[in-house]
Image (spheres, grey):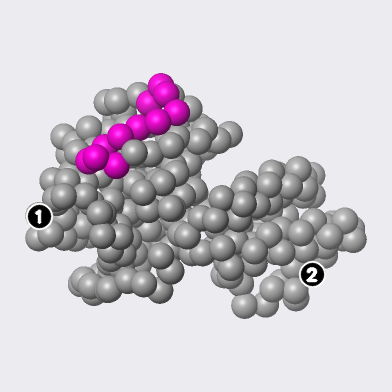
Amino acid sequence: MQKTDYTEINLAKGNVRIYDFGTAKLHAYQTNDLIDDEVFIVEKDGRGFVLEYPCFFDNISELESYIADQGIAIEGIVADYHMAGASFLAGAPVYATREADEYGHTGGGKALIDDFTAAFGNAFDSSIATVTNVIESDELELAGVRMNIVRTADAFDVEIPELNAVYTHMLGHDCHSIVAGAGHADAIVAQLRGYQDAGIDLVLTSHYTPEDLKDVQTKIDYLEDLKAIAAQSADAASFKAAVQQRFPEYAGENYLDMTCGFFFAE
């Protein structure tokens, strides 16, 4: 499956790219919200599950209507890194690891929810999902689709062998990422090389449309450049300026600011 092999439905605010694998479908919902969220629905034989939450009220109602129109019976929500937006599909079972539950309710995820609540006000659904089903093993099956659960420092990634796809929090081949120093960059590179070794078709992330292994290599190159620039920079300001000069078209300057803070902590 190529990342361009989809049909598209334009909704009032967002849009959905539908990838048809024959035995299953992937619905990639691009919210077009203020933080560029992406939400995924995996459907098989009229049953389905959702990966991540939409967190703005207008997207919540739009995606709920889309699911109803498509006639997909949702069997659960897999909440990896995004737990705001608990009004979405209220009453649906929520699956997460203990680490992800902590991240969303008291850890870094909760801190982001607090920031977004202050920034976006009533448009943002700050209610946090309650995990009803704790994922204890390294596998999970919903709607007849098997997933591999890959625990991370904050929460967990999901491998979906039937789609030859993997879900992780961020990739973004033409935008900055939050990189917590050279060691973290090396860890991300190792993870991405694992995708290459496995021959993954689609990389799904919370803030970007589905990407492929060409995009993975672009990100690896970016991370290696980031480390090299940091090694040659005297401080955060010169580091940021050099990165912006090297990648002038990249989005996500706020992420770059966070990366600068990690590489050059005061």
Kindly report which numbered mark, 2 or 1, lies closer to the viewer in this rendering: 1
Q: Is residue 37 magenta?
A: no
Q: Mark 1: which secondary structure?
A: loop
Q: Is residue 224 above or below residue 158?
A: below
Q: Image quadrant for the N terminus?
A: bottom left
Magenta span = 135-145
Q: Nearest the camera: 213 or 75?
A: 213
Instruction: Where is residue 16? Give x, y as percent.
Output: 28, 67
| Quadrant position of residue 221 | bottom right
Q: Mark 2: which secondary structure?
A: helix
Regarding residue 65, the answer to whether it shows in the image is no
- The amino acid sitting under disc 1 is Gly
Regarding residue 72, the answer to whether it shows in the image is yes
Instruction: Where is residue 104? Give x, y as percent.
Output: 42, 34
Which residue is pictured at 35% across the width and 32% down the height? 140
Q: Name the residue under label 1.
A: 71
Q: How far apart are marks 2 and 1 (CA)?
A: 50 Å
Asked if the residue under mark 1 is in contact with the one under mark 2, i.e. CB atoms within 8 Å, the reply is no
Which residue is pictured at 43% across the width and 37% down the height? 148
| Quadrant position of residue 134 | top left
* Direction from residue 46 to residue 119 in the image, left or right: right
Which residue is pictured at 62% across the width and 48% down the height? 194
Q: Is residue 126 above or below residue 138?
A: below
* Direction from residue 216 to residue 7 in the image, left or right: left
| Quadrant position of residue 74 | top left
- The amino acid sitting under disc 2 is Ala
Q: Which of marks 2 and 1 is nearer the N terminus?
A: 1
Q: Nearest the camera: 218 or 172?
A: 218
Q: Mark 2 points at which residue?
A: 242
